[in-house]
Structure formats: C-alpha cells, structure tokens
Image (spheres, rainbow, N blue to C red):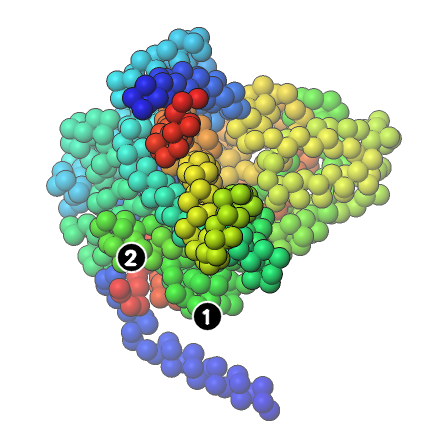
Amino acid sequence: MGAFLRRRLLAVIPLVLLTTSLVFSLVLLLPGDPAVALVGLENVTEEKLAAIRERMGLNRPLYVQYGLWLARAARGDLGTSLRTGQPVIEALRDRLPVTLGLAVAATAFGLLLGFPLAVVAAAKRGGFVGGCASGIAAFGVAVPNFWLGSMLVLVLALHLRWLPATGYASPLETPWDGLRHAILPTLTLGASAVAEITRQLRSALQDTLNTDYVRTARAKGIAERGVIWKHALRNALVPMITVSGLTISRLVGATVVVESIFALPGLGRLNLESVLTRDFPMLQGAVLVMVLIVIAVNLVSDVVYGWVDPRIRLS
Amino acid sequence: MKRIGVVTICALLAAWLSADPALAQPRAGGVLRVALRAEVSTFDPHKGASGTDHMYLYPVFDTLVRFDDKLQPRPGLAESWETPDPKTLILRLRKNVKFHDGTPFNAEAVRFNLLRAQDKTVSSMVSELINIEAVEVVDAFTIRLRLKRPDASLVLAFTDRAGMMVSPTAVQKLGDQFGRTPVGAGEYRLTKWTPGDSVRLDRFQEYWEPGRPYLDGILIRIMPDGDTRVNALRSGQVDFIMEIPTQDFASLKGEKGIKTSEGPSLAYWRIYLNMSKPPLDKKAAREAINLAIDRGALVRTVMFGLTDVAVTPFPSVYWASNPALKPWPYNPARAKAKLVEAGLPNGFTFDMVLEPTPEHVRRAEAIQAQLGAVGIKVDLKPMELAKGVQGYFRAKEFMAANYRWTGRPDPDQSLRGMFHSTGFYNPGKYQVARLEELMDQAKSVYKLEERRALYQKIDEIIQQEAVDVPLYVAPVLEGMSTNVEGYQSNLLGKPAFRGVWLRLSR
C-alpha cells in the first residue's frame, strides 16, 4: 500500500506542472491587454502601459513570467489581484469553502437519491417503477443546470416563497439561514449528480445481477431483497468510488454557472469575473485551486479504490 | 358614469395619500439592501477607472460639487464658486465638515486631493484636470485654481471622481491599503467588504448635514446576473436593483410591492465610424447609412419600446442637447440617392465590430438587414469586448463598431472624445474644423446659458456633417420595493442613494 501511495503522489507533481503551465499560456492567449484594462481605455498612453507592464512583469518572456510565478507560488505567494489589490491567496481562502461545500453537498445529495433510484431501476427493470427511475436519471443528465436553477427559483422561491432566491449565508455562522440558502444551489448542482450516479450504479448492479454467484445465491433460495442488498450491491459499489470522485470534479467545474445564478461568492464566479476583468493573477490562482481539487479528489478515490480492491494496487 | 366614479375615488385617494403626514415626512432608520452587477474595483476614487464603481463611491465620498437631475452643478462641499476671470476658479468651502476619521475638511485638504488627482503615478483622471496650473490656498475655506486655459468643464468634473474628497491623514497613513479601507466625508462609512459577495456601509454619525442620512446603512450585494437581480427583488431579498434586463422590465412593472423607474441616460447606442477609411470619409456615404436605418424599428424590437431614438449625442432632457433637431428620417430612397451622390451606385461594404452576446447580435443583425436593403453590406465581426475595443480604437483594424457611448458628466468630455481629432474614440482622427473651434469656445465660457447655445450649434453640425450615427438612448431601468422612498434617478445611470429612506425598517 505504501509503494502504491508513493507512486500516486509522485505522479501529482508533473501533473501540477503541466496543468499550471497550460493554464498560464491559455490565460495569455485571452484577447485584451491587462495593462489596458487596468489604466482604463481613455487614459491609455504608451508610457503608462509600459510602466504597468514593467511593474507587473508583463514585458518579460512567457517562460520567465511562468518561472517567477511558479517560484512565488511554491512559497504560497500567488500575487495580488490586478483589479482590487486583494492578495490572491486571501480571495481563494475566502471562496474555497463556498465552492467545496457546494460540490460536496451536491455529491452527497446525488448519492442519497441516486442510490435508491439505481437499486429500483436495476431491480424493477422493464417495469413501470424501474422505468420511472431510469426516466428521472435521463432527465437529470439532459436538463441544463441553468434552466433547472431558474425553474427551482421560480417555483420554490418566487411562487411558494419557501426559500431565498439567491445569496449566500455561512452555515457555520448562521446554521439555519445557511441551510436555507444552500438548498436551491445544491438541488440545481446535484441533479446531474443524481443522474450520473443512478445510471452508473444501475448498470453496475445489472451486470452483477447477471453473474454466476448471484445465480447461485438465487438458486439457494435467498429472497430477491437479500440477493440485491447483501450480495450484488457490495460488488457493484466498487466502481462507485471512481464515479463519486469524477462527479465531485465535474461539479466543481459546473459551479461557474450555478454560483452565477445564485450569486454565491465561490471559486466558480471568481473564475468568471477574473476572465471578464482580465485579472490574470486571480484567474491563475483560481484555476490552480480548481486543478488541485480535481487532482486531490482523483488521488483520494484512487487510494480508496486500491484499499477496497487489492487487485488495483498490484497492477 | 362609472368612469366618473372611478376618477372621483382616485382623486379622493390621492388627496388622502398626500395629506398623510407619514408619507411626506422621511423616516429615519433601516438598512437599504441593493443588488449591483459589478463589484467595486477599489474604494480609492483617484486610482480607479471603472464606471461601475460610482454606486459604491458616492455614499462614502462627498464631492466638491453635486449635480441635479439634469446634471447641472449644485453646491456640495464647495458652497459656491466664481470665476473672476476665465483663467481663475475660486471655490468657497463648507465649514464644520469632518472626514470619517475626524480629520477636518478645509482648503488644505482640498489642495491635497487635487494635487493627488493630478499626480500621474496615482491618478486615473489626470486628463480631466489637465488645465489646472496651480492650486492655491487663499484662506482656511477658500481655494483658488489658476488655469492654463479657460476650462468650463472643471466644475462638472468635480461632481465625479475628481471632486471626491479623501481624508489626507488616512491616505498618508494607509498608503496602498486606502483603496480597501477608505476614509471620506460622505454620508456613510465602509464597515465591511466581503470580496465577491457584499459591501456594508454604515451611517456616519457626524455627517455635516443635519438629520442626514436617513438610513442606518446600505448593504450592497454583488449579483452579476440580471435574472438573479430580478429574482432577488421579487423575493424581497433586496430593496433596489439596477440594469434590469429589458425583457424582464415589463413584467416587473406591474408587480405588487414593486415600483420601477425608467428614464433616459447620457449613454446612447451608436455606430462608431472610422472616417479615415474610404468611403466613410465621404459625407454622402455617411448620410446614406443614417438614412437607411429604421431607428424606430430598433427601439420596438430590440429594446421592447423602452427608450427613445437618439437624435444628438445627448438625450433631449439634457441641458446641452438641441431640442430643435429632428431624428434622422428613415428614408431608403434618399439613402440610395446619397449613395449615387457619393459615387457608389452599387453600394459598398464595411465591417463592424460588436459584442458577441444575443442582445448585441440582434441589434447588429437588424442594422445589417436595414442597410442591406439599400445596397450597403455590413460584415459583422462579433468579438469579445476587450478584443474588439483594442482592434477598433487602438489597432484601427476595422471600419466601424457598434458600441454604446457611456456618457460623461460634462458635454465637453463626450464631444471631445468622439468628435475632436485628438479624441480617443475618434480612431480615424477625422477633423471638422468648425466643430473643434466651437468646442474650444464652449469650454472657455462659464455661463451655462452661453455654453448651452454653443453646444446646440455643435449638435447641429454633428448632424449636418453626419459624423455620428446615433441609434437610441440607453435607458436607465431600475426597480425597487415600494418600501423605498425618496430615490431620484440620474442621467448618468449611476444611482446615488442620497435622500433615500424606508417606510418600514427591518
């Protein structure tokens, strides 16, 4: 297990280098000059631009800029926002909990609802109930989250007035308010997680239900309920580790849209705003954190997988 | 008969309402909750350049001069001003004013502010104050500005960033941190800024104007998405929103518990032409473009009828606009004749930059179709704003752009930017000598009436020479809870919450 972990951790380093350098060059491909954005169009003069480029190091070759950024980033200094002057690391620290909380809550919601739906869909395959469960899953995959979010707001917040339409309240400081604010974004983001988990688990369960040992279990006269819950489900759950990890990663990306709909001060919106205002250090930092989250989630799911299924460790 | 009854009831109701003392008397207390699209970039009024910062800056920083609903200057921290000769501007300052940190406001403080606003290493508004040669302290509450040349636009420039007074002690003490922990002399102090989420302003107890402000505070939530802002108002989470998406405005208008405010702004949609690129250097070609556009149709379809067609660079209610001018008629036959006159009987082609979002594309496609009908082909170049602005204004790669002119407090700033050969927004550096003479003349007279006459002449020449392709006025669309009283919209489309009070506080 130790060697497996070491191997996995070592692989993270080139991955981080590759993604950050990629992000760095992509950011510079964005149209629009950050120096111009900073001075304001009307006040633009060549001297002013030169001075800003000099100060921000934008006049140096790309690889030098990247090297300097990396060296500082390794020491925990991600620079300051071009727009507000706020240290990037501070902004990330404030916003990370919002996004992470949202993604985890949505995945948990996905598991909670996806689990029973998948079992029903697999067990009652071909029947009306099973068809409904599969239908819900298909709906969740097909419906775009910006539409679902708007519909939920329309019905639950504006029409019925049960929940707040937008905004964020910290669940740590104000638990009740925080919870109420979290419900709609979680449902919006979690719908696709429900769908994904249902579909994956259903097909894994169906495969397992067709194996020889399940047939043997049935032949021994075990009730169908016991066959599914005790024998089949356990094995079908192994791939769910990977699916959950992938779901969290994907949801972190989807927060860009959901955080905008609900005006949540998270990383997703920080990404969007930084792109729109050409706030490169901020964008760079926000993307870096998102990449790190995805890498970390993958790492954890790999390790857990290896722990649950010894065959993985050996290969 | 029935109708008369209704009218009577309405009249009685109106009389009863206006007699209700609770309505006439502003109530103190409560926190106004506002949703804005963009976050403040910095609370340092001298350093920032973003037009979306003002809603945050107005409450915190009192200005030397205030503006009224027609954008005419009114006393602010300067109680009065005079120009003994065209190259001298004397400001008499209000006494007993304090900054939030207790620093007294006086002529020394104004001098500190103006020098800072002129300092190239700090300020983004050097060009507005370029004509100030010296700032002299006459006595504790009088300041004299010596000018290089007469500059009538200064007074209105003092209603904007250049007139926002920062506490000299705080700037010296805080340095670069000032932009995040500002100290002004305005009605409210910044008490909490949660980046990306909200800004909390609290009442400044020692504000100079007795009884003001009415509110205990203002809470600004940042909501970039238009529908999100509308939802927040509908659900009662906020009391005030601006920049309401045009398609949502009509439905919001009649809603219970909500009142809306619509009016013109100094901003207008236009086609920017690079008039150094042939055939746009020919007046007849530009006239053809103007005559071939059906502005009324654009207003009806793209803007849901929520605004007026633009006639001059200014809306009709503005003091510098010329009410005698008529909008360009929609006359395809005359447009074709003008093309023949320009030696272009088969029309011509030009490329036009625009933003790639649905509203912008809809407008540009409508224009494309209208111009196409007379033989002028428009090659649409939708591209991201920063890239388009760079490509059109700086690199001068394109012949035209379909953008908004965002408006400025003083007419000189707008006109000089777009129509003077030195203007940044005139990428072709196209020159109409008569226009430039009049602009200089208007800048050197201080009487509003005299300036008005000159600007009206300028408006006329702009239309005669067809150097502008005005489309329609950008409307100010705001919505608020019926709980909000005393709000007055302004032509800049940048809400200032001075005088606002709440019927019920929460």
Q: Residue sitting at 67 percent across and 40 percent down?
A: B364
As displayed, is residue B148 above or below residue B235? above
Residue B91 pos. (x, y %): 27, 38
As displayed, is residue B338 above or below residue A165? above
Residue type beneath disc 2: Asp
Residue furthest left as drawn: B102
Q: Residue sitting at 27 percent across and 51 percent down?
A: A171
As displayed, is residue A269 above or below residue A20? below
* Chain under numbered label 1: B
Question: Which residue is labeled 1 in the image?
Answer: B256
Question: Which residue is labeled 2 in the image?
Answer: A177
In the picture, measured across the screen, residue B141 lies left or right of residue B313, that is: left
Residue B217 marker: none
Number of residues whose C-alpha sits closer than 10 Å to that of mark 1, classed few (under 14), some (14–19) or many (20 or more): few
Number of residues whose C-alpha sits closer than 10 Å to that of mark 2, classed few (under 14), some (14–19) or many (20 or more): some
As displayed, is residue A163 above or below residue B220? below
